Amino acid sequence: MSGCGNGSDNLEDIGNNFKRVVVQPPKKTSSIIIQQDPDDSQTITSSLKPKSNCCGGNENKSSCCSSNKIEEKPKSGGCCGGSDNKSSPSPSSSSSSSCCSSNKIEEIPKSGGCCGGSDNKSSSSSPSSSSCCSSKNNNKIEEKPKSGGCCGGNEKSNNDSCCKSEKITTTTTTTTTNKPIIKDDSNIISSDATKVIEGDIIKASVGCPSDTPLAGSESICSSCPGQSACKSQADNPDKKSIEIRMKVIKNKILVMSSKGGVGKSTVSSLLSYGFSKRNNNTTKVSVLDVDICGPSIPKLMGVEKMQIINSEYGWIPPKVQQANHDIKVMSVGFLLGSPDAPVIWKGPRKTTMIRRFLKDTFWGKQDYLIIDTPPGTSDEHLSIINSLKTCNPDGAILVTTPQNLSCDTVKKEISLCRELNLPIIGIIENLSGFVCPCCDEITEIFKSDGGKNLAEEFNIPFLGKIPIDTNLGKSAENGVCSICDNPSSPGSLAIQSIIDKIDQIIIDNKKKL
Amino acid sequence: MSDQLVAPPPENCPGTQSEMSGKSSACAGCPNQQICATAPKGPDPDLVEIEERMKTVKHKILVLSGKGGVGKSTFSSQLSFALSMDENVEVGLLDIDICGPSIPKIMGLEGENIHISGQGWDPVYVQDNLAVMSVGFLLDKEEDAVIWRGPKKNGIIKQFLKDVYWNELDYLVIDTPPGTSDEHLSIVQYLKTSNLSGAVIVTSPQDVALIDVRKEINFCKKVGVPIIGVVENMSGFVCPKCNKESQIFIPTTGGAEKMSQDMNVPFLGRIPIDPLIARSCDEGKSYLITHPNSEATKQYNLIFNKIKETVK
């Protein structure tokens, strides 16, 4: 199965019933590079570490490549090779912040060149010491060299190259800790690499620097057929266009939740209605729907029959046709031939579409851009966050229901935000309590306070609870603003107070910068 | 081979698996050209292995929904519990929701691990005749996020099918994530030669959900997956105090039943909202066992019987 959609492979070709709008379909050129490891299908790690520029240990005191920093995404820009943090305390301490310190296993250095162990040759400690690609005998698996020129396991037979062969492919079968053990040369699964216990198998992933300025220039690129494409793309012209578009938008807020059906789209639409009513209905708001497979925003905002217009300034998004609301909406829903046509795209195509939304949509000067995301922690999220990285997004609002199952899943989204350094504005607990219209008895259908407890546990502001309000549901189905229709219903009141809190948090955060 | 492509095929791509791949004029300039031209053509050998594994599984049921949060995982787990109530029936539950694996929690298997035996990966057993596999078992902590792009997810799904030792199963229930994307394409593609019995589509009554579900039905029709039927979940709530039924998720366009008629697919039934279902899921217990006499259980059983009849 091809790693990207298109072509004559039957399954991928279907569902692309794009109607003839004035908009040109996205260009499918070789400038589209997949964020993919060369042996992607076989190496599996628990989390991708995208490639924001490695500060080399300078920006973060808690250095970008320190122990237990798996969640870091250094590595574009060059692993310091241990040199930036020479002054840090004992390299063998696990809390040391040298770029290639002990427990490096969890590091993902390597764009910019794995030191090859040489930087730390002088380290006096045991094998578990701080060479960048070392540590205990058979745990090199957990290394993630590779963007930027670690051998990727290829220089196996030589010397103390950074990725000694048997390390990567070694499996052990100890069950002393009863941890998952999966044996297979190429199909090694790693769980969170901070958990390195002797005998566990964790395989490094090969990091492709395609998303970084070093794309195409790293040593690992020499064997990659995509090298020429990467080199030509190295400047990433898209990024500049996106920055230009985003510069005139004051506040950019993502609405996320790894759990489906918690109300992300509903909350996004309510937030947009709420924000647009401020300052006597003069606030300009835009909503971007990056849920490519299930775009709900057009329906919720009553614009599903409208079209995008192509102009010299870019794609002009349709506007909400309700009085007192200056809201523009962009969604893949407008590009479909029929509302029932499925969009069966693989990741890379979705990434391209999202970039085009950001790059080509003529938003104009806006006060707020609210971005509705699909459930999960996958392509769309990585793409949107990476694309907006240099545009100062205000952060993410996480939506959950009170149920444990939902909160547990949303913890993953919190991990994602922390890994990608996206600030979290707060947590909203939706579907929190049902008020029976007949007797006013409140029933907690999905338990209670789950969102609040989650916020406390992770030290995130709790923005508020939205009860199950049938008026909200009706207005949503009809694509109208429920705050205008029923301003005093519990749902509307809840959303108003949430908006006030969000504003305050954004202002506070901006002051801190 | 197909996993080695590094860029999307260009327009007019002759097909990455075709005879002309890498050689036609459209291939010039495509980063995949080298790979296509030199890689061996023909069926993916992994598919052959998957077919072998799946030969011992009689009925494979996909649980789909274009929309998130309608109750796919809840439904899959209850279906598995119900099917496995007969001790002579062997049931497997495969969770291919890589980013948000809910099945371990719902089945009460949090913290469990996967072990390897000579025959492959051993699934985790809830009871003697109910085996479960999910990416959740590979994560250390529940807050570990699995932030993978499509190809990686496809890789693990392949492994679930290829390497897991399911042994002889009467039913394999496959829980999917929302949407119509990588995971869905992969599972359908990998099981193409293994006789997928069909798909059950779960939805809630609201129109916002039905839009996505219509897409899912069209997806199934296009890829050739037979549709066993549509289930309307979270359909109606009976207030425990006054016993009045309200619709929380309002079916402005007639709900799932009307949609199934319009799209010519069987309608299997409705399940009302019961807060105890959510609680059972949180606690990892089977709702059908803890509350055998509730309205929701009756509806579940009716629907499950219809499914069993259809797949026979």
Image (tube, coloured by chain):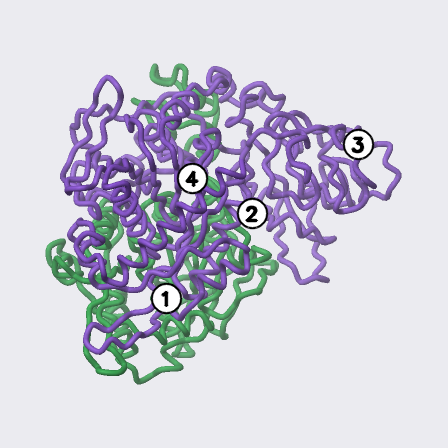
> Does the rendering let one see residue B46?
no
Pointer 2 or 4: first along the chain? 2
Mark 3 belongs to chain: A
Which chain corresponds to the colour green?
A: B
From the viewer's perspective, tell me whether residue B2 is left or right of residue B60. right
**Disc 1 to disc 4, C-alpha distance:** 25 Å
Q: Quadrant of residue A351?
A: top left
Disc 2: which residue: A46
Residue, x 22% and y 78% (percent of image)? Answer: A439
Amino acid at the residue labelled 1: Thr
Count of numbered labels shown in the rendering = 4
> Does the rendering let one see residue A287?
yes
Place of residue B128 in the rendered image (x, y in percent of width and height, measured from the top left):
50, 74
Disc 1: which residue: B74
Amino acid at the residue labelled 2: Ser
Residue, x 31% and y 24% (percent of image)? Answer: A360
Q: Secondary structure at mark 1?
A: helix
**Disc 3 to disc 2, C-alpha distance:** 30 Å
Place of residue A267 in the rendered image (x, y in percent of width and height, measured from the top left):
31, 51
Amino acid at the residue labelled 3: Lys
